Image: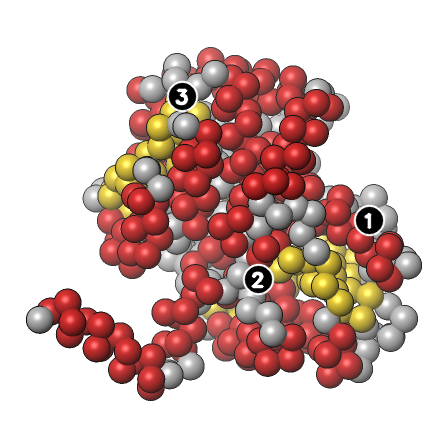
Amino acid sequence: MQKPGYYGQWGGAFIPEVLYETFKELNAAFTAAKADPAFWQEYVDLMATYSCRATPLTHADNLSRHFGGAQIFIKREDLNHTGAHKANNVMGQGLLVKRMGKKRVIAETGAGQHGVATATMAAKFGLECTIYMGEEDVMRQRPNVFWMEKLGAKVVPVTSGSKTLKDAINEAFRDWVTRMDDTHYVMGTVCGPHPFPEMVAWFQSIIGQEAHQQIIKQFGSLPARVYACVGGGSNAMGIFQGFLDHGEVELIGVEAGGHGIDSGQHAARLASKDASAGVAQGYHTMFLQNDDGQMMDTHSVAAGLDYVGVSPILTDLWQQGKVRFEAATDQEVMEALELTMKREGIIPALESSHAFVQAYKEAGDMEADEAIIINMSGRGDKDIFTVAHAFDDPSWKEFIIKKGAEYAA
Ligand SMILES: *Cc1c(COP(=O)(O)O)cnc(C)c1O
């Protein structure tokens, strides 16, 4: 029999002894909530009134004609409150925190998107909120730090190690050990020790439930393929769960190919040959690490995909051949983004654009009576600095220089 929290050989809960009781409590609360239909209904109602659920499924008819193959549908997670699927997870965990009677939440964030979502949830539920962030990331992600603070969160810059995400994770765990009685750690994706992968996947499954019903209603049958970008894997697990029981639907996860999977500068764990099995950050999966188990430096134009590990659930599905993994390069992502904006008036996040790349590579070779779904995990407004820089937009440059001069004066 499979041990709880394991997916094949992957997953588990490698936690310090002192957190044992806290995890026991969390497991009990989550198991009870999952078995209680009233809890799921409360979650669905909250997401309907606070976060625009159900999010639409948009038929991209211009792009479908452009490629002359499959009918392209886009699941619009960008229309969530705070602009991405992250809202599904944090609001769900917020309801669980209320159920456990805790008063404070902590989280770690790299790009800052999960920090903003958590700070939003904490404000809505009246919880104290502390966000750990590497000092480097605090410097790079000032707009998100600004909003976290304005939403009432305390942002703690972490100065140890490389001053980035993995150091922030360590610091957040250190905090949790000292405040276990009143604090919940809000994990941002389907990674980390059990029960987090299962919990986050459960909250995100709302995407797949809706998408399944919507494609049947709008197209009349199941899609041939479903595409999602994969950082930790939460938006992908969210939509995939709506189709996993239907073997005829092919599921495709798209990782960050960065400068190319042969360049050593990417974050492709399962689509490259660079990752190996290991235990870190409380769980067992395929990590981008060197022979000594030290985590490698990853690269992606999309900060949300720039991560060394990947969900143990996805690693298992990949090993079983149930999810195909591909990688999209930074360059391809910019091209897909531009095409999507011009043809459909939709601005996908750089992360989401990875899924669009792979769908666009394949759509033209498919039949017009087949449908594909692209999970658009978030909106691209947040990426204006990166995108304007990549397009080398002269007017934008002028605008930034002028703004800078205003403050310097
Ligand atoms: C955070 C983020 C991701 C990556 O996280 P997953 O857990 O892999 O879904 C993808 N897209 C957007 C827009 C994000 O903000």
- Mark 1 neighbour density, 10 Å: few (under 14) some (14–19) many (20 or more): some
Q: Position of residue 15 (x, y in %)?
A: 45, 25
Q: Is residue 32 visible?
A: yes
**Circles 3 and 1 in contact, beta carbons < 8 Å:** no
- Mark 3 neighbour density, 10 Å: few (under 14) some (14–19) many (20 or more): some
Q: Position of residue 277 (x, y in %)?
A: 54, 44
Considering the numbered disc 1 on the image, is that residue within a helix, a strand or a loop? helix
Q: Is residue 167 visible?
A: no
According to the picture, the residue beneath numbered tag 1 turns out to be 213
Q: Cβ(mark 1) to ligand 1 < 8 Å?
A: no
Mark 2 to mark 1 CA distance (whole Å):
22 Å
Q: Amino acid at mark 2?
A: Ser
Left or right: 80 in relation to 213: left
Residue extending farthest to the bottom is 394
Of mark 2 and mark 3, the one earlier in the sequence is 3
> In the image, is residue 191 above or below residue 58?
above
Left or right: 133 in relation to 245: left
Considering the numbered disc 3 on the image, is that residue within a helix, a strand or a loop? loop
Q: Amino acid at mark 3?
A: Lys
Mark 2 to mark 3 CA distance (whole Å):
33 Å
Residue at 61% across / 40% down in the picture? 49
According to the picture, the residue beneath numbered tag 3 turns out to be 103
Q: Position of residue 392 (x, y in %)?
A: 37, 83
Q: Cβ(mark 2) to ligand 1 < 8 Å?
A: yes
According to the picture, the residue beneath numbered tag 2 turns out to be 352
- Mark 2 neighbour density, 10 Å: few (under 14) some (14–19) many (20 or more): many
Residue at 90% across / 71% down in the picture? 369
Of mark 3 and mark 1, the one earlier in the sequence is 3
> In the image, is residue 350 above or below residue 37?
below
> In the image, is residue 61 above or below residue 311?
below
Of mark 2 and mark 1, the one earlier in the sequence is 1
